[in-house]
């Protein structure tokens, strides 16, 4: 099966390459698939495949033959990597990012990012075809609320708001052990770890200012659920600061957290079935962005948008409540 789709190039798309044009008008299709369609000769400009390396002119006729394979691959992403829309206005989106989905692709390791899997209704501006822009990041294996800008102007406003610390975020983090202080503030500069390319570290000499406020939300027998509010926005800040205090995030192997938690670790007398490996209760770091609060560039109103706790995290807390109630 082949489905043909075509467009007449509008003035706002003048001088775009055919590839960039298709990325805008087919924002729900992964860019790698569109590039392959170009390579395979499935795209024409004014009926010819000879102009694919030249800028488009207004009035040009662009057509793509969407093969069954491309359609299936575009629509067949895993359900657990879909993102839910939590809030939208003319300037911003807030989405609920699942763990395992990257915000940006680093070193081209990630085939899909948040922008690639946005709901079709908000994947691109209906007039300009411009896709939303990333304003801040969540680590790939952190779930929760993510703020996106719908235009370059909105991104500039929100980026400046982050610089001026007018955007507030709340995270939930589960750690192993008993955190004694109900409230504390970690003020410890963070810089790159020169001995490990992927890690950051507390570095009083070369690091940049980093401040995180911590509040105990719930104590279990052997575990503590914390609310973390980063005042600054350094890479891996909450993870680094919790490891620095001696309480790394559960499941965060990069910073010393126990790699996984099993039901047999918390349920007295539990034994898994013979011959069957026990599945971990949580297979990623126990970190979730619960809330983002900001002034919308579109309305000027202060918005506080909450993301429901990810299901794997929620089930883990239910098991702790049942078997490790403090």
Image: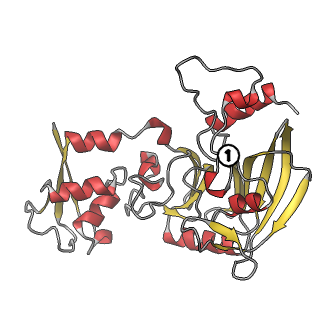
Categorize mark 1 by other alpha carbons within 10 Å: few (<14), some (14-19), many (20+): some
Residue 288 appears in view: yes
Q: Which of 156 and 173 is in front in this view?
A: 173
Left or right: 22 in relation to 133: left
Residue at the limit of the structure toward the right, as seen here: 181
Q: Is residue 144 above or below residue 68?
A: below
- Who's the residue at 72% across and 52% down the image? 171
Which quadrant of the figure has residue 148?
bottom right
Q: Which residue is drawn at 67% across and 49% down?
A: 287
- Indicate whether 15 appears above or below 59: below
Across and down, in percent, residue 239 comes to 69, 58
In the orientation shown, which residue stands out farthest toward the top? Answer: 274
Quadrant in the picture for the N terminus: top left
Q: In which quarter of the image is residue 313?
A: top right
Q: Position of residue 141 (x, y in %)?
A: 57, 50
Answer with the quarter of the image where residue 130 lies: bottom left
Residue 229 lies, with reference to residue 324, above or below; the image says below
Residue 234 appears in the picture as rendered:
no
| Relative horizontal placement of residue 264, taking residue 14 as reference (left or right) | right
Q: Name the residue under label 1.
A: 258
Residue placed most toward the observer, 231 or 193: 193
Where's residue 234, x and y in %? 66, 69
């Amino acid at each position: 099966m082949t489905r043909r789709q075509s467009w007449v190039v509008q003035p706002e798309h003048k001088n775009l390459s055919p590839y960039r044009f298709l990325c805008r008008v087919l924002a729900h299709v992964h860019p790698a698939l569109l590039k392959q369609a170009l390579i395979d000769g499935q795209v024409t400009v004014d009926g010819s495949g000879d102009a694919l390396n030249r800028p488009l002119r207004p009035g040009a006729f662009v057509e793509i033959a969407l093969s069954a394979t491309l359609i299936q691959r575009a629509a067949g992403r895993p359900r657990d990597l879909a993102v839910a829309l939590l809030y939208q206005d003319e300037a911003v989106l807030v989405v609920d990012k699942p763990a395992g989905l990257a915000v940006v692709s680093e070193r081209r390791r990630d085939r899909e990012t948040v922008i690639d899997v946005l709901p079709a209704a908000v994947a691109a501006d209906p007039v300009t075809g411009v896709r939303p822009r990333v304003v801040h990041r969540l680590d790939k294996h952190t779930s929760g609320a993510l703020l996106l800008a719908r235009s370059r102007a909105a991104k500039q406003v929100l980026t400046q708001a982050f610089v001026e610390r007018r955007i507030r975020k709340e995270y939930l983090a589960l750690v192993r052990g008993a955190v004694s202080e109900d409230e504390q503030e970690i003020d410890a500069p963070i810089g790159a770890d020169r001995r490990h390319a992927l890690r950051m570290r507390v570095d009083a000499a070369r690091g940049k200012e980093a401040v995180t406020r911590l509040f105990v939300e719930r104590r279990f027998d052997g575990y503590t659920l914390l609310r973390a509010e980063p005042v600054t926005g350094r890479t891996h800040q909450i993870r680094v600061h919790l490891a620095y205090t001696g309480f790394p995030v559960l499941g965060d192997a990069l910073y010393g957290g126990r790699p996984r938690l099993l039901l047999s670790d918390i349920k007295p007398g539990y034994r898994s079935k013979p011959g069957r490996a026990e599945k971990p209760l949580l297979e990623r770091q126990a970190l979730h962005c619960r809330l983002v609060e900001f002034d919308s560039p579109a309305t000027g109103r202060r918005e506080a948008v909450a993301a429901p706790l990810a299901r794997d995290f929620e089930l883990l807390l239910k098991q702790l409540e049942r078997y490790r109630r403090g």
